[in-house]
Amino acid sequence: MPATHSSSIDLASIPAPPSAVDQPAASPISLAPVSAADAGAGAAVTDAPQETAPPPAREPRPAPATPVRHHTVAKGDTLFSLAQKYYGSRSKWRDIFAANRDVLASENSPLRIGVDLKIP
């Protein structure tokens, strides 16, 4: 038999599906237990905890603030000496300068005696 293309199939030759009138009525589906013996089978479903709404989202806590120390400038203090004193490294002087830009004119100007500096 030669191969036929789907457009050449005669639709009249396909049998119609059985109508709902010809079929017996289906019984309704019940999820409840039918007898006392079946009660245990449905218990897992009925005893399940009810779904609850998730708790309201909390706002993220800000990171704990790092303690800021203070130093009152004394005679002979420099950013280098303060970095060595507080950090153990003279290379950290820029951290002290950055924290005190509001009271320091420039990184090269001498520190004024009595000025309160923040030591981050």
Image: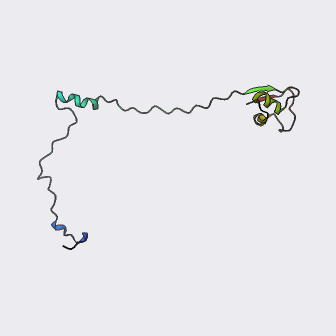
In depth, the one of 72 and 90 nearer the eye is 90
Q: Quadrant of the N terminus?
A: bottom left
In depth, the one of 85 and 119 nearer the eye is 85
Residue 57 locus on image (x, y percent): 50, 33
Residue at coordinates 20% horizontally, 32% vertically from top-left?
A: 33
Residue 69 locus on image (x, y percent): 74, 26
Q: Quadrant of residue 19?
A: bottom left
Residue at coordinates 76% horizontally, 35% vertically from top-left?
A: 92
**Colouring of the image:** rainbow
In depth, the one of 120 and 115 nearer the eye is 120
Relative height, residue 106 to residue 66 (above, below) = below
Report the side of 46 relative to 94 (left or right). Answer: left
Residue at coordinates 23% horizontally, 31% vertically from top-left?
A: 41
Report the side of 20 relative to 63 (left or right). Answer: left
In depth, the one of 25 and 106 nearer the eye is 106
Residue at coordinates 46% horizontally, 31% vertically from top-left?
A: 55
Report the side of 27 relative to 87 (left or right). Answer: left
Numbered-mark total: 0
Q: Quadrant of residue 32?
A: top left
Q: Which residue extends farthest front?
A: 88
Relative height, residue 91 to residue 71 (above, below) = below
Residue 28 locus on image (x, y percent): 18, 41
Q: Quadrant of residue 105?
A: top right
Residue 120 locus on image (x, y percent): 73, 31
